[in-house]
Image: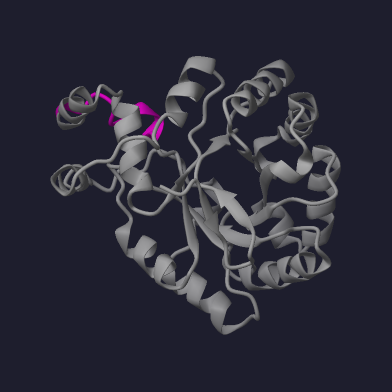
Amino acid sequence: MDLNFTLNSGTMMPKLGLGLYKAVSEGEVVQAIKDASTLGYRLFDTASAYKNEEEVGLGLKACGIPRSELFITTKIWNTAQRIGNVEGAFERSLERLGLDYVDLYLIHWPVPGCYLDTWHALEKIYKSGRARAIGVSNFNEIQIQDIIDHSETVPAVNQIEYHPLFNQDSIRTYCQNLGIAVQAYAPLARGAYLDKDVLKKIAQKYNRSTAQIGLRWILQKGIGVIPKSVHLDRILQNSQIFDFELDDLEMATIDSLNEGYRSASIPEDMQI
């Protein structure tokens, strides 16, 4: 299996990355990035809303990996969209990260009445070279089509919650048919499916953990994964998913676990 996606921008994006949601203390973030980079991780995913971009920037400097080999993602938060301060929010993210550019800049949530204007601002950032690719997160088919119909640039990525308990195959198929890469956040569902008997049985066959089985299932759907961890053993375990393959029956069995369970919370300002 190829370890990278080629995005519609021409940028190469690793299929595996380290999610940094809720990793906030400086030492914790820096150590996690150093550990992950030593194990071969090159994609690191943060966001303005995570309040850790400065710590991520310190970790990127400390890891010793050349900038050209890293893939850094961050995201614009809803407040900046609502006040129309996209450029300012982006520049502040760059400053906190200590970078001249990011590899991927995402609209974190599709704020009604705002996301089209936000996208047009992202297009300007993309054209300036300060973001090597731009995309969206938590968007559905209608919202993505709205962007495509009213702009010049097709999103490179749609980052969504996706795991065995929340199998969003409709939006996955829609995006993949348009050449939009899909990336799964919360791919371990905060641990919600790790004790499932069917996964334990499959894991035993391959001498793997249920987490590795879940991540492998996502990969075989053609989706990237960014599991979050700050623990060296789990960061290592989450990376050991490229050297085995689930068969069609096992894939279908895991498909059957879908129950529409969302492990990540929807922001209060998006629930109005």
Q: Which residue: 38% across, 69% down?
A: 174
Residue 213 in magenta?
A: no
Outermost bottom residue: 149
The image shows residue 123, relative to residue 78, as above or below, that is below
User: Does residue 124 appear to the left or right of 180 in the view shown?
Assistant: right
User: Does residue 186 appear to the left or right of 230 in the view shown?
Assistant: left
**Residue 148, how many percent across, how many down?**
55, 78
In the foreground, 222 or 131: 222
In the foreground, 107 or 15: 15
**Residue 254, how many percent across, how many down?**
20, 42
**Residue 104, how many percent across, how many down?**
66, 54
In the foreground, 52 or 157: 157
Majority secondary structure of the magenta segment? loop
The image shows residue 258, relative to residue 230, as above or below, that is below
Q: How is colour applied across the structure in the image?
A: one colour
The image shows residue 212, relative to residue 267, as above or below, that is above
In the foreground, 116 or 168: 168
Q: Which residue: 29% across, 24% down?
A: 208
Quarter-wise, where is residue 125 in the image?
A: bottom right
Q: Which residue: 70% across, 42% down?
A: 69
In this rendering, the count of numbered labels is 0
User: Does residue 129 appear to the left or right of 218 in the view shown?
Assistant: right
Quarter-wise, where is residue 222 in the image?
A: bottom left
Quarter-wise, where is residue 43 in the image?
A: top right
**Residue 200, how many percent across, how many down?**
19, 25
Per the rendered image, the range of residues in magenta is 188-197
Q: Which residue: 60% across, 33% down?
A: 20
The image shows residue 193, relative to residue 67, as above or below, that is above
